[in-house]
Amino acid sequence: MEWNFLFRIDYLKEHGEERNLKGLLFTGDTMPPGPDEILAFLEGSGFRNMRIRDAERLVFEGGDPDNPVQIRIVKLGNEEEADGDRILRLLAEQFRNR
């Protein structure tokens, strides 16, 4: 199943510096992705040395020691709940294992 999520990146050494980004994961069943799957997504997206800080609330910390980040999953939903981000879905389909 396709899972869309919105995550917030907070650069911990720069007060007030936050960014919201979208992510997309595919799972083999109807269960939402767990913290380990999201952590693998973040690592694959270039966020190195991340660790799970709060598995229940989906909060991750780590990154470069000179510029640590905290990443929080703000919204997580499946394809039926998607709000029509058609371009993101088409792009992700190009990378999906067939």
Image: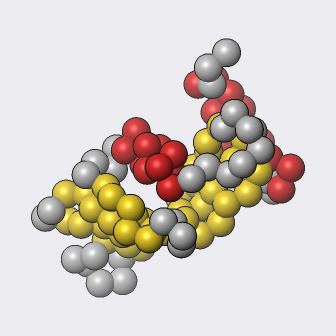
Residue 37 sits above or below residue 60 on the image: above
Nearer to the camera, 36 or 2: 36
Q: Residue furthest left?
A: 66
Residue 19 visible somewhere in the drawing: no
Q: Residue at x 60, y 61 (%)?
A: 6
Left or right: residue 41 compared with residue 17: right
The quadrant the N terminus occupies is: top right
Q: Give the answer, above or below, for where 34 lies relative to 97.
A: below
Of residues 20 and 59, the one nearer the viewer is: 59
Task: Tell me residue 54's x, y (percent).
Answer: 44, 71
31 displayed left or right of 64: right
Identify which residue, 39 or 15, lies in the foreground: 39
Residue drawn at x 57%, y 53% is: 34
Instruction: Count every numbered label the image shows and give the total.
Output: 0
Locate residue 31, reporting x and y percent. 72, 48
Q: Can you name the residue that lies furthest to the top here?
A: 98
x and y percent of residue 23 in the render?
57, 50
The residue shown at (40%, 39%) is 44
Left or right: 25, with 52 as reference point: right
The one nearer the camera, 83 or 31, is: 31
Hey, which residue is sitting farthest bottom in the picture? 15
Considering every residue shown, the one lying at the far right of the view is 80
Give the quadrant of residue 68.
Answer: bottom left
Residue 80 drawn at (x, y percent):
86, 50
Q: Residue at x 31, y 71 (%)?
A: 11
User: Would you identify the image quadrant in which residue 98 lies?
Assistant: top right
| Residue 38 in sight | yes
Rendered position, 86 above or below 60: above
Q: How is the image coloured?
A: secondary structure
